[in-house]
Every structure is written in C-alpha cells, then in structure tokens.
Amino acid sequence: MPQSAFENLPPLPFLVISALLAVVLFIFIARLRSTKRELEDSKQENVKASQALADYEKKYSGIISVDKEIKVRDQASKLRQDEANAVFFKVTNDIEQLQSSYKEKKNTYDSLIHQIGIYDDDVELLELGFYERKRAIKQ
C-alpha cells in the first residue's frame, strides 16, 4: 500500500498544523458571516432610505412641484420681458421718427402761415380800398 505524506510526520507538528488550519478556517467563516450580516444590514438601510425618500417626495411634492412651476414661470417671464423690450424699442424708434417728421412739417407750416399772413394783410387793405403793389417774395 502506498504510504500517505502525513504518516512520516511526527504527531505534534501534524496537530499544530491542523489546529492552525482549523483556527484560520474558523476566522474565515466568522468573517464571512459578519460580512454577510453587514451586507444584509446595508440592504435593509438602503430599503429604509429609499422608503424615506419616497415618503419625503410624497410629503413635499407640493413644494417640489412649486419649485418646478417657479422655474417654468421664470422662463416665461423672461420671454415676456424680452418681447416687451422689443416692443418698447420699436415704439421709441417710431416716436423719434414721428418727432423728426413733425419738426420738418412744422417748419413748412410756419413758413406757409407767415406767407398767408402777408397776403391776409393785403386782403384787408384791399377790402378797405387801398392798393399797394408789392414785389414777389423770393426765398
């Protein structure tokens, strides 16, 4: 029969090696169980945190939706402000053009009133029977 490798070893070192292997195996199994418990605890904490988050979202959904609504309305307000600014600049430009046109036409009007005034005086004198010859006004 073949002899095993352990038959040649003295009994004391064999016992020591066996004891050390048993201790290492016991420590490994204990660590494995501890890690498994920590993993299960971590999973439970994760489930609790997820549930708490869902509860908070449900509890504060009004506030969260208000925040979203504020953002939407703020963007809409900015768009309306931009549109109002564009209209303001257009109206301002139209007013400036109108004022410029008014000044030109006012000058023409004043000139015509002055010329009418000269002829109006002549008409009054003619009605009274006076005649005064005038030369044409050149401008």
Image: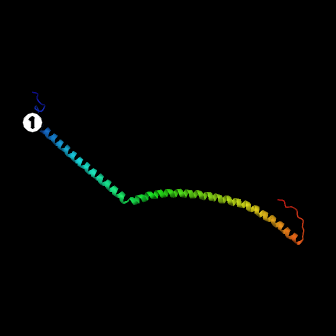
Tell me if residue 30 comes above or below residue 79 in the rendering.
above
Residue name at image x 14 percent, y 41 percent: 19
Q: Give the image location of residue 68, x and y in percent.
A: 44, 57
- The amino acid type, in three-letter code, at marker 1 is Pro
Residue name at image x 38 percent, y 58 percent: 61
Q: Give the image location of residue 46, x and y in percent.
A: 30, 52
Q: 124 or 10, which lies in front?
A: 124
Dot 1: within a 10 Å radius of its alpha carbon, few (fewer than 14), some, or many (20 or more) residues?
Answer: few
Q: Give the image location of residue 20, x and y in percent.
A: 15, 40
In this rendering, position of residue 120 left or right of residue 43:
right
The quadrant in which residue 133 appears is bottom right
Q: Give the image location of residue 3, x and y in percent.
A: 11, 29
Where disc 1 sits, the SS reads: helix
- Residue under circle 1? 11
The quadrant of the image that shows the C terminus is bottom right
In this rendering, position of residue 2 left or right of residue 40:
left
